């Protein structure tokens, strides 16, 4: 196989065709750049006297060998690894599972708590959360510890504006609509935080009231459909930031968010919608001439029957969902008719994916090839 030096790098013939590699990239990613024990990069390309220049290169068996000008250093790259990196292909990622967009006919995947202590059970559950954005776990004990233990199977509980845990039931002095028996409009949680919580756990401890049905929809599915129908409105909601707040006597949270959140590939990864936390829109009034109609059109779109899954969460069940992608709400209930108590907490989305990747490896599965997947 031939190697051709260029002014900026080299071209090497690989089984799938010739590929170009930049000299900076090659020098920085010499296998010796990484510590075998910590797996971290230990080479500092900025500490070189000058820019890296290739003095000579050749193929030796299954490796590309590069000698560097002005350095007593030779790099040896596995050709299979180079082929996997060619043309800017992302590193294979087991967690880069395409979202399975769902609509009102969706039946949520259910898992039994007893099955989640083994790696395969946890792996299947984590995959459902990445793919569908939601899953129900049954068989939780009626205790605070049951929720913590469940969350810890995927990650660490991370605090929010409500503290590490919150209890959704009627409060005597409510600071939040969720702490009343009133209808709770479709929303995502706490957009007043700079980074709203990633994965939400809602453990139903009691539910004997009349009403109080849970309302869930896939915001990514709804927004992708909306993009097809109203591309200009979609663009506004995906680019212009809107202010959100959560304010009372002892706190004053504020943050700006885009109503439609896109991933690096341009697909919808989530929404930020919260009527009760939307601040007074402060965009220029002539921008609001276009923004408000787009916003209202989208919020009405979310209320279409095409998307909504309505169901009753029962005691002993915990619904777990992506707080960015899955929009949720609650029908009003009669506070005098019984007892309703949901205890909640959050973990980060990144930790869900980290846990999934490690479980994926431990359970002996192989990551999909680059290029066959879409970034989550
Ligand atoms: Fe909520």
Image (cartoon, helix red, strand yellow):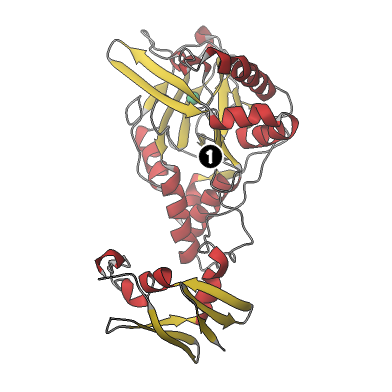
Residue at horizontal 36 percent and vertical 69 percent from the top: 28
Residue at horizontal 67 percent and vertical 29 percent from the top: 232
Q: Position of residue 327 (x, y in %)?
A: 57, 29
Residue at horizontal 46 percent and vertical 65 percent from the top: 362
User: Badge 1 local density, few (<14 within 10 Å), some, or many (20+)?
Assistant: some
Q: In the image shown, does 64 or 243 lie closer to the viewer?
A: 64
Which residue is disc 1 drawn over? Answer: 138
- Is 46 positioned to the left or the right of 152 in the image? left
Q: Is residue 114 above or below residue 298?
A: below
- Is 33 positioned to the left or the right of 337 in the image? left
Q: In the image shown, does 185 or 314 lie closer to the viewer?
A: 185
| Quadrant of the rendered image containing residue 286 | top right
Q: Position of residue 153 (x, y in %)?
A: 41, 48
Q: Position of residue 154 (x, y in %)?
A: 42, 48
Residue 190: in sight, yes or no? Answer: no
Q: Residue furthest bottom?
A: 61
Q: How many marks?
A: 1
- Is 293 positioned to the left or the right of 263 in the image? right
Residue at horizontal 63 percent and vertical 20 percent from the top: 299
Q: In the image shown, does 202 or 223 lie closer to the viewer?
A: 223
Q: Residue furthest front?
A: 7
Q: Position of residue 360 (x, y in %)?
A: 50, 61
Q: Is mark 1 within 8 Å of ligand 1?
A: no
* Quadrant housing the N terminus: bottom right
Q: In the image shown, does 250 or 111 lie closer to the viewer?
A: 250
Badge 1 element: strand
Residue 223: in sight, yes or no? Answer: yes
């Amino acid at each position: 196989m031939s190697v051709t030096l260029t002014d900026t790098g080299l071209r090497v013939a690989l089984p799938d065709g010739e590929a170009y590699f930049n000299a900076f990239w090659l020098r920085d990613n010499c296998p010796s750049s990484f510590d075998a024990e910590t797996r971290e990069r230990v080479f500092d390309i900025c500490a070189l006297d000058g820019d890296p220049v290739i003095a000579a290169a050749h193929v030796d068996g299954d490796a590309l060998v590069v000698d560097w000008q002005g350095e007593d250093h030779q790099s040896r790259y596995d050709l299979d690894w180079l082929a996997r990196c060619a043309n800017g292909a992302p590193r294979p990622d087991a967690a880069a599972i395409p979202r399975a967009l769902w609509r009102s006919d969706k039946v949520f995947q259910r898992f039994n708590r007893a099955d989640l202590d083994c790696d395969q059970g946890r792996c299947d559950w984590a995959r459902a959360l990445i793919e569908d954005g939601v899953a129900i776990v049954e068989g939780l004990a009626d205790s605070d510890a049951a929720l913590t233990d469940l969350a810890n199977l995927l990650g660490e509980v991370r605090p929010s504006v409500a503290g590490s845990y919150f209890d959704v039931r009627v409060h005597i002095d409510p600071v939040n609509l969720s702490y009343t028996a009133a209808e709770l409009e479709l929303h995502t949680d706490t957009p007043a935080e700079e980074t709203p919580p990633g994965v939400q756990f809602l453990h139903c401890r009691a539910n004997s009231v009349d009403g109080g049905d849970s309302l869930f929809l896939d915001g990514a599915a709804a927004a992708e459909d909306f993009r097809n129908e109203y591309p200009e409105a979609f663009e506004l909601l995906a680019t212009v930031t809107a202010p959100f707040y959560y304010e009372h006597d002892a706190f004053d949270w504020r943050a700006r968010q885009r109503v439609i959140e896109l991933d690096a590939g341009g697909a919808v990864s989530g929404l930020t919608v919260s009527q009760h936390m939307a601040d007074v829109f402060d965009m220029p009034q002539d921008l609001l001439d276009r923004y408000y109609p787009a916003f209202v059109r989208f919020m009405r779109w979310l209320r279409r029957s095409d998307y909504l899954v309505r169901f009753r969460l029962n005691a002993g069940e915990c619904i777990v969902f992506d707080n960015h992608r899955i929009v949720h709400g609650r029908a009003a209930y009669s506070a005098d008719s019984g007892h309703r108590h949901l205890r909640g907490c959050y973990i980060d989305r990144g930790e869900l994916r980290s846990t999934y990747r490690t479980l994926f490896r431990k359970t002996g599965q192989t990551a999909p090839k680059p290029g066959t997947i879409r970034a989550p």
